Amino acid sequence: MRVDSKRVNAGNGSGKPGRAWETGWRPDLVAVCVLALLTVIFFRRFVFSDLMLFGTDTVPTGYMARKVYAEFLTGHGVIPLWNPYILGGLPFIDALHGDALYPASLMNLFLSVHRFIGIKLVVHVFVAGLCMYAFLRVRGLRHMASLVGGVGYAFAPYLVSLIYAGHDGKLYVTALLPLAFTCLARGLGTLKAFYFVMLGGVVGLILLTSHVQMAAYALWGLGLYLIIHLIGVWRRDRSFRAWGRPILLFAAGVFIGFALGLVQFLPAYLYTSAFSPRAGGVSYEYATSWSLHPEEIVSLVIPQFVHYLDAYWGRNPFKLNCEAPGILLLLLGSVALCLRWGRRAAAVFLVSVVLFFLSMASTGAVRMVFTLLAVGGFVYSIARARDLAFYLLVSVFALFYAVGAHTPLYRVFFEVIPGVKFFRAPSTIMMLFLFATAALAGFGADRIQSAGRSPEGQRILRFLVWGVGAGVVLLAVLAVGREVLVNAWEWGVFPEMGGRRGILEANYPAFLKGVGIALLLAAGAALCVWLVSTKKVRPAWGVGGLGILTIASVWPVDGDFVQTLRVEEFVVRDPITHRMTEDPDLFRVLPVTGNRAYDRNYLPIFGLQTVNGFHDNRLRIFDEFTADGRLLNGRVLDLYNTKYVVTTRPVAGETFELLEDLGRKRLYLNRMVLPRAFLAFNFEVIPDGARALERLMDPDFDYRSILILEEAPPGLRPDGSRLPIPAEVLAYGANEIRIRTRGETPGLLFIGDNYFPYWRARVDGAPARILRCDYAFRAVPVPGGTHEVVLTYRSNPLLAGAGVSGAAGVLVLGWLVVHLVRRASRRPRDNA
C-alpha cells in the first residue's frame, strides 16, 4: 500500500517529515502479518483442530442450510433453488438461505461443512482488521496507529460475539465495511473513476452476503460520509460547483454495486415484498424488538454490567452477543475528540450524553424534551469536531437508531427512511458505531504518537490521569452504594425488572471487577503516553503498547463467545432418526419435542423433510395455513404428507401408532397420511382464501377426496364418483420434480408442497398450469391416460439478476485487472 509522506503528515497533523520506513511496503506487510498472527493465536483451538465453531443459529440451522447447499452443488453442479426440507418447502435464494451467492461460499466445495463455516468466519475477522487498517492508512494515519485501529476493530466484542450468535452474514458485512469506506475515501480524494468502481464491487459483495438490513446500514454510512465531504468542499470553496463530479461518481459506484448484487437483491426484494410474512412491512413493535436498552448502553463501556449469555438480566428475551467496542477504543476515541474540542464543546458533549440516557429512562413529554436537548448538544459537538465530525455523527446516529422505541426519533426513522419498515433488531446498526469508534481510536493513537513532549502530549496525559482518578472515585461509590444503585435502577430505569433483580445482584461483583479492569487499562494507557512524552520509548513503541492493551481489553470478553465442539456431538443418529432414514418412501416429519435445536432443522441434516422448522423469511401462505395451532391438526399433517411425529408426550388417536419409545422421545406413525402426490377427480372452487380455509377445516369436509381451487380448471369438471389414485414420484429434487400419473379420465395432480408461482409444469413436455389448491398446495390438471409431469423451479428475478450481476462482475474485475497491469508496468520505469 503506497502512501506518500506528504499525505501522511497532512492527515495526522504532524509538521515533521515522514520517516523513510513509513512510506515503503514493509510496514504494511508487518501489519498484515501481525493481524494474521493475532487471528491464529486467538482462534488457535479451532485452527489447529478438526472442531467447528459453535453458533446458536449455526447449530443446526446454518449447518443444515450449508449442508443442503454443498451436497446439491457438488452432486448436481448447480445451486439449489428450493429448500424442500423445512416448512413445507420454500425458495433457497429468494428467501435468503444465508450467503449461497457470496464468493467465499465456494470454499464449501473443498472443505467439510463444519470446517468451512468456521474457517470463513475466522478469515473474515482477519479481513475486518486488514480493511480497517487500510482505511486508516488512506486517511493518512501512521502504520502503528492504523494497526491499533485495525486490531481493535477486528477483535471488538461486537464483531467476535456474532460468531456465538451464529450471525455470520452480519460479521461478513462488518468485515467488508471499512473496505467500502477505503474505496470511497480514496475516490473522493482523487476523483478517479477506478476507486468508485471498486466501491461498487465492495457494495456488491456486501449485498451478496444476503444480509439486506446490514447492507442498508452500510449504504447509510457511506452516504453520510459523502454528505460530510460535500459540506467540507462547500466550506472550502463556498461553491456548489465541485459537488457534481463526486455525486455522479458515488451514484455510479452504488449503481454498479446494486448491479453486482442484483442476483441476490432482486429475488429477495420481490419475495419479501410479496410472499413473506414481512410483505407490506412489519409492525412498529416488531421493528423495535431487540433494541438496545439503557442497560445495554452502559454495557458499551463495561460489558459486565448487563452482561450476556447466562448472566444477562436486561429486558430483551436473551443476549447472545455484545455490542461493546472495547474500553481502549472508547478511550482513544475520546482522546482524539478532546484534542479537537475546547472545554466548552467537551462539556456540551458530556451533558448531551447524560441527556440522551435520561431520555431513554423517561417517557412522554419529558422524553421529548430530553431528546431535543440531547440532539441540540450533539449537533453543537459534531460541528466543532472538524475533520472528525463524520465519525462522531455516525456514532450518535447509530446510538439513536439502536435504542429503538426508547427514543421518539425512531418513529421518524420508521416512517421516513425507506426499508426500515421491513427491518427489526435496531441494535444491529451498532456496526456503524464500531466502525466510527475504531476510526476515532486510530486518530487518537496517531495524535499520541505525534505529540511527544509537546504541550499536546501533556494535555493527553492529564486527560487520562483525570479520567483514571474519576474512575477510581466512581468505583468506590459503586462498591459502597450497591444497594442504592440497584434500587435506583429498578425504580427509575427498569421498573419491569421483577425477578431479574436477583441476576443483577448476583452479577454485581463481575460488574465491579469490569470497572476495575477498565481502570487498570486506562492507567496502562496513561503509562504508555507518559513513556512517549518523556522519551523513555519511541513513539511507535508506545502506541504499540496501546495496541497490546487493546487486545487485553477485549480478548477476555471475546473468549466467552468463541466455543468449539465436535460435529459428532450434535450430528448423531438415534434409533428414531435411523428408523426414519431407512424408510424409502417420500414423507415429512413433525418433531415437537420441546428441544429447540431438534425441532428447528436438526432432522434435515440427515435428509429428512420436516413440516415445521425455522426460517426468518418463510412463506406467508404456510404461516397463514398453520396459524392458530393448525399445524397439529390431523388433516394439515395429512395434506403435508407428514408420515411421522416425534414427540415427548403420548399421541392420542386411532390414526397414530407408536413405533419407538426412547423415554424422552417417542416416534409415531401416521397411518392415514396422504401420499406426497395423488390424482384427484373431485374439486370445489372457492376464490376467497378465508372461506376456502374455513371449508377445508370443516370436520364434515372430505379433504382426502375433494380439492379446493381458487379458480376452475379449463375443460375439467368435478367427478365425485372416482376416488383419488396415488401418483408415482419418479424424482424429487430441490430444482425439479418428476411424477408419473395413471388415470382413465382427466384429473388434478395434487402435490403436497407449498404453492409458489415460480414453479413451472410440463405434462409430457407440453406446458401446463399449476393451480393453487387447498389454500397452500399445488395442483396440475392432467388428461386421462399415463403421463409424466415435470415441475421445474424457475425464478425470473433470479435469472434477470444473474445476467446483470455477471455483466457488473466482468466490469469490476476487468477494471481491476487493467489497473493492476498498468500499475505493474509503471513500476520498472519509476524505479529506473
Image: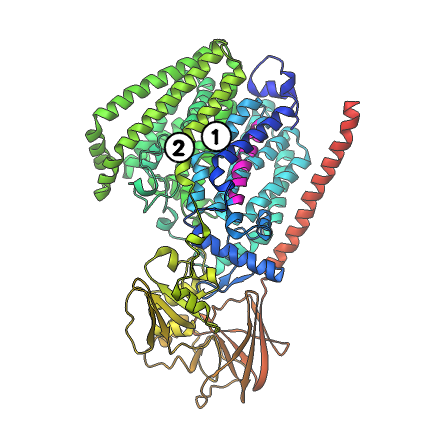
190 or 295: nearer the viewer? 295
Q: Position of residue 224 (x, y in %)?
A: 52, 35
Residue 391 against residue 757 in the figure, above or below = above
Residue at the location (62% across, 79% down)? Answer: 764
x%, y% of residue 175? Answer: 53, 39
Q: Name the outermost residue toward the bottom.
A: 721
Q: Quick check: 305 left or right of 640?
A: left
In the rendered structure, which amino acid carries the disc numbered 2? Pro
Q: Position of residue 266 (x, y in %)?
A: 56, 54
Q: Residues within 10 Å of mark 2 (few under 14, many from 20)?
A: few
**Camera-side residue of 657 and 683:** 657
Inspect this view and state whether residue 774 appears: yes
Rounded to the nearest whole Å, what is the CA distance between mark 2 and mark 1? 14 Å
- In the foreground, 171 or 597: 597
Q: Which residue is labeled 1 in the image?
A: 152
Question: Which amino acid type is marked by label 1?
Answer: Gly
Label at residue 556: 2
Q: Where residue 573 sits: x, y (%)?
A: 42, 61
User: Who is closer to the viewer here, 427 or 352?
Assistant: 427
Q: Quadrant of residue 253?
A: top right
Q: Residue at x 60, y 30 (%)?
A: 240
Q: Is residue 413 visible?
A: no
SS for callout 2: helix
Q: Which residues are magenta?
A: 119-136
User: As displayed, is residue 562 above or below residue 24?
Assistant: below
